[in-house]
Amino acid sequence: MSAIHRQLPRFAFPGVKKSTSVKPRSRPPMPAATGNAQQQAQQPESEPVAVPGYN
């Protein structure tokens, strides 16, 4: 992991603007992953709710 952190600073040195644009780009994927996780969490919740309803 330390190697990845060292590579990030190296890229930031030559182009600080590039490193700034890289951060925002990395953030969108994270929220998307969180949205998927929320959908998956909702599915399991609706399943148990439907199970008692059917019973």
Image: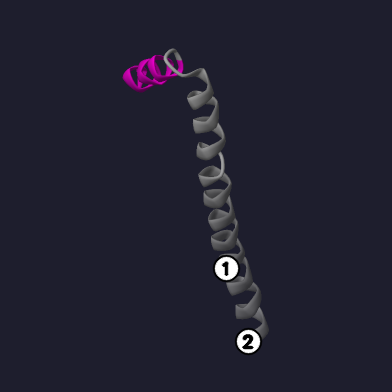
Residue 55 visible in the shown view? no
Numbered range of the magenta stretch: 1-12
The correct choice, above or below, for 44 with respect to 14 in the image is: below
- Residue lying at the far left in this picture: please name it: 3
- The residue beneath circle 2 is 54
Which mark identifies residue 53? none
- The residue beneath circle 1 is 43
Is 4 part of what is drawn in magenta? yes
Q: Residue 51, position in %: x, y?
A: 60, 79
The three-letter code of the residue at mark 1 reads Gln
The correct choice, above or below, for 53 with respect to 41 in the image is: below
Is 46 part of what is drawn in magenta? no
Cβ atoms under marks 1 and 2 closer than 8 Å = no
Of the pair 22 and 51, the residue shown nearer to us:
22
In which quadrant will I find the N terminus? top left
- Residue lying at the far bottom in this picture: please name it: 54
The three-letter code of the residue at mark 2 reads Tyr
Residue at the image position 37 percent from the left and 15 percent from the top: 6
Residue at the image position 46 percent from the left and 18 percent from the top: 12
Give the secondary structure at mark 2.
helix
Residue 49 image-quadrant placement: bottom right
In which quadrant will I find the C terminus? bottom right
